[in-house]
């Protein structure tokens, strides 16, 4: 999605990212239809994508600090809905704030499910800072540690090549207690597909059941859904993508997020984002929220 100058092959660090080059979604397209090649095995017909090259670099450099999800700072986020302190469990807040996300992982073990695979520990923090109010508090922080396995794939769906797959265990919470406590545990899979400058990924999950008496948010999956779908385009001068979550129920709920990035330098991009739906933050997971933000993207993982 990033559209800055092409990156060179290097040991993956915090800023060596797939797609950080101009239109570098794939070095080449698949030359012909391929059948499933198994974890860690590649068909002779497969061309190397930047994501595939990123996985190989990680496999060869364990215990390094690398990006997991998107790393960004949005100094200006504006709420466009009418949610007020009577609807929000954590009280009154300004409709302008700063949002930032820090997300990294550390590869621990290479070759877990094939030659080009690795097991890693990941951590993501997303915070909402009321920087423009009087006391400037951090309104909410969401924490997500994960244990996951990543491997190269080699199969095709609808003309798109699945270049990488993941399975993981995730705990997400806001670190609060009592009435403000929010949290859930999930097992998920993620499958990443590419075709020329276009891509999509599918991330279904299963919520691990909790005892109802101790469950802080017993119906959170009705609002955050049971899958996340991403699709987009990465070009020379800009990149754009859309994220969709949905519960696939008759009482339909979910979320849509639109993203637009453009290069500002080798390792930084301008970032515009629009969000509409449920699950913007854990504290207000059951409230429909609409917001728009502008800032910079600093790094991105797979």
Image: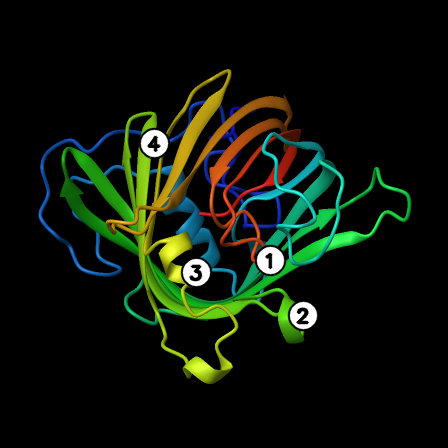
Quickly name the residue at label 1.
Answer: 283
Q: Which mark is residue 176?
A: 2
Q: Residue at x 43, y 23 (%)?
A: 23
Q: Is residue 160 above or below residue 91?
A: above
Q: Nearer the viewer, mark 3 or mark 1?
A: 1
Q: Nearer the viewer, residue 238 or 8?
A: 238
Q: Is residue 289 above or below residue 284?
A: above
Q: Residue at x 54, y 47 (%)?
A: 280
Q: Which mark is residue 59?
A: 3
Q: Nearer the viewer, residue 5 or 156?
A: 156
Q: Is residue 242 visible?
A: yes
Which tag, 3 or 4, sits closer to the chain's start?
4
Q: Look at the numbered discs 2 and 4 and tell me whether their residues touch, using CB distance below 8 Å.
A: no
- Image side of residue 235 versus residue 98, left or right: left
The secondary structure type at the circle numbered 3 is helix
Q: Nearer the viewer, mark 1 or mark 4?
A: 1
Q: Nearer the viewer, mark 2 or mark 3?
A: 2
Q: Nearer the viewer, mark 2 or mark 4?
A: 2
Crowding around mark 3 (Cα neighbors within 10 Å: few <14, some 14 to 19, many 20+) is many
Which tag, 3 or 1, sits closer to the chain's start?
3
Q: Look at the numbered discs 2 and 1 and tell me whether their residues touch, using CB distance below 8 Å.
A: yes
The secondary structure type at the circle numbered 1 is loop
Crowding around mark 2 (Cα neighbors within 10 Å: few <14, some 14 to 19, many 20+) is some
- Image side of residue 257 versus residue 284, left or right: left
Q: Which mark is residue 295?
A: none
Which tag, 2 or 3, sits closer to the chain's start?
3
Q: Residue at x 84, y 37 (%)?
A: 132
Quickly name the residue at label 4.
Answer: 26
């Amino acid at each position: 999605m990033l559209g800055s100058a092409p990156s060179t092959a290097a040991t993956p660090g915090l800023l060596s990212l797939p797609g950080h080059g101009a239109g570098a979604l794939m070095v080449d397209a698949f030359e012909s239809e391929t059948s499933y090649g198994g974890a860690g095995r590649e068909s002779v017909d497969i061309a190397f994508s930047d994501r595939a090259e990123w996985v190989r670099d990680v496999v060869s450099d364990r215990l390094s600090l690398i990006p997991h999800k998107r790393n960004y700072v949005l100094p200006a986020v504006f709420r466009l809905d009418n949610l007020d302190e009577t609807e929000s469990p954590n009280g009154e807040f300004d409709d302008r704030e700063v949002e930032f996300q820090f997300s990294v992982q550390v590869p621990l073990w290479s070759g877990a499910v094939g030659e080009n695979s690795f097991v890693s520990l990941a951590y993501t923090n997303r915070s909402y800072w009321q920087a423009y109010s009087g006391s400037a508090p951090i309104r909410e922080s969401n924490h997500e540690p994960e244990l996951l396995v990543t491997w190269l794939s080699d199969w095709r769906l609808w003309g798109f090549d699945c270049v990488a797959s993941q399975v993981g265990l995730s705990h997400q919470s806001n670190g609060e207690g009592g009435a403000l406590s929010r949290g859930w545990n999930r097992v998920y899979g993620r499958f990443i597909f590419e075709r020329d400058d276009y891509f999509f990924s599918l991330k279904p999950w299963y919520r691990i059941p909790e005892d109802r008496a101790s469950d802080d948010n017993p119906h959170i999956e009705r609002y955050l859904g049971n899958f996340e779908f991403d699709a987009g385009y990465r070009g020379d001068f800009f990149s754009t993508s859309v994220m969709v979550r949905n519960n696939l129920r008759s009482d339909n709920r979910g979320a849509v997020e639109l993203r637009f990035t453009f290069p500002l330098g080798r390792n930084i991009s301008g970032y515009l984002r629009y969000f509409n739906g449920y699950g913007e933050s854990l504290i207000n997971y059951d409230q429909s929220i609409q917001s728009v933000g502008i800032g910079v993207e600093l790094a991105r993982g797979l």
